[in-house]
Amino acid sequence: MRTLTTTTTTNMMNITNMTSLANNLITSTNTPNLKIIETIRVHDLTFFIVEQEHEASIKYLKIQITNTTPEELYASIEGVLTELQSITSKGYLNTTDLNNVPIIKHFIKFFIKNESTEFSGGDRAMDGYKWIYNIIILNLYVISNHISIKMEREDPETDLYHDFKTLNRKLLNNLDPSIRKQLQKRGLSIIHNIQTGFDTEYVNATTMKNILLSIQLAVNTQTYLKLPIQTAYKLSSVNPITNKDYPISKTNRSYFEYGMVEQSINEGIKSIRLMRYEQLDLCVAGIGKRLKAITYLKHFEKSGYIYFKLPTTPIKQYFEFTKEYSLHEMVRVSNKLGEQSLTDTQQKLV
């Protein structure tokens, strides 16, 4: 008996996506247990180095939206972007001394430990630049999304609204792929497998040749529910071909604030997801919690997703007398036998 499995995936993204501005997380510095360590002003934008008072070791960078007009905020963000882009206008970082790099120079000292110069002007300066650049871009993305969502509700027909939408795309594209993955809209997916066992009967015509008499197929289906898991971001790189994450080696921890970098990025990701995908994330998490409570459903986690294995459907058998039979024909028949079971399973799920 030999087996063949064919797979189809259905992406269930029709859960209503409601937005929440989450003002306490984005625009307020009066969050309980939050202490401001330092204030940084760049192009009329205000950034804060803040610290969790109940966890003194956790510090991160966040941005404050001041009472300025959308036009002024747009101009400020574009001003920061223009300066940042001037650094790499030749396709590479034109200096290794980050203390003299526009925009970056205002932030680098807060991410350096023990007055080290390794990440601000030494061999690891490019690493220091990369992560501080991404933190700044992510915070600008928070502001731009905050304003564009508000404008979408109030007056989506203005040129400025469309300018912000374009700015959102530009900022998102400038983020590291590992961070962009965390900002994706991910919903529930249904994976359908048609499993086919097949066998043949034949007689010997000669010592070198057989004659096919019949084929037998046994077909059932297996369905998986695939749900995304929202986990805390860890510094990583992404394989552009496989989309797999590879953790960054955090060498020289005594010289660079890796924890502060990760916390800053996680705070930005959390703000964006609250604004854009709050209801979706709550729905997916709720579905996952209920499915885990069903004891007969097996589940496993892989690459940022949790898979729930539904029971297999009853076996359908097929028999045919024939003198020839192709792989193409076998796939056609097995799909025909399995399609109704898959349709019934999906209707029950929906």
Image (tube, grey):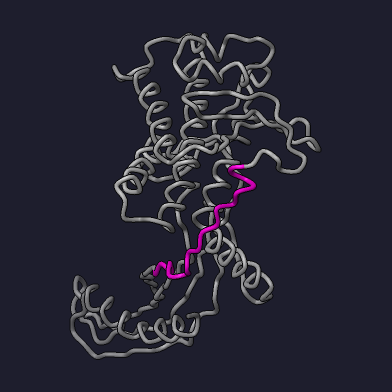
Whether residue 313 sits left or right of residue 264 in the image: it is left
Measured from the top left, where is residue 176 in percent x and y?
A: 44, 35
Whether residue 208 sits left or right of residue 316 in the image: it is left
**Among all residues in the image, which is located at the extreme right?**
54
26 falls in the magenta region: yes
Q: Quadrant of residue 35?
A: top right
Tell me which residue sits at (43%, 86%) in the image.
Answer: 344
Q: Is residue 64 above or below residue 214?
A: above
Tell me which residue sits at (49%, 47%) in the image.
Answer: 146
Q: How many marks?
A: 0
Q: Nearer the viewer, residue 71 or 13?
A: 71
Measured from the top left, where is residue 117 in percent x and y?
A: 58, 9
Whether residue 131 sits left or right of residue 211 in the image: it is right
Tell me which residue sits at (31%, 55%) in the image.
Answer: 157
Q: What residue range appears in magenta?
A: 10-27
Q: Quadrant of residue 287?
A: bottom right
Q: Nearer the viewer, residue 241 or 263?
A: 263
Q: Is residue 89 above or below residue 328?
A: above
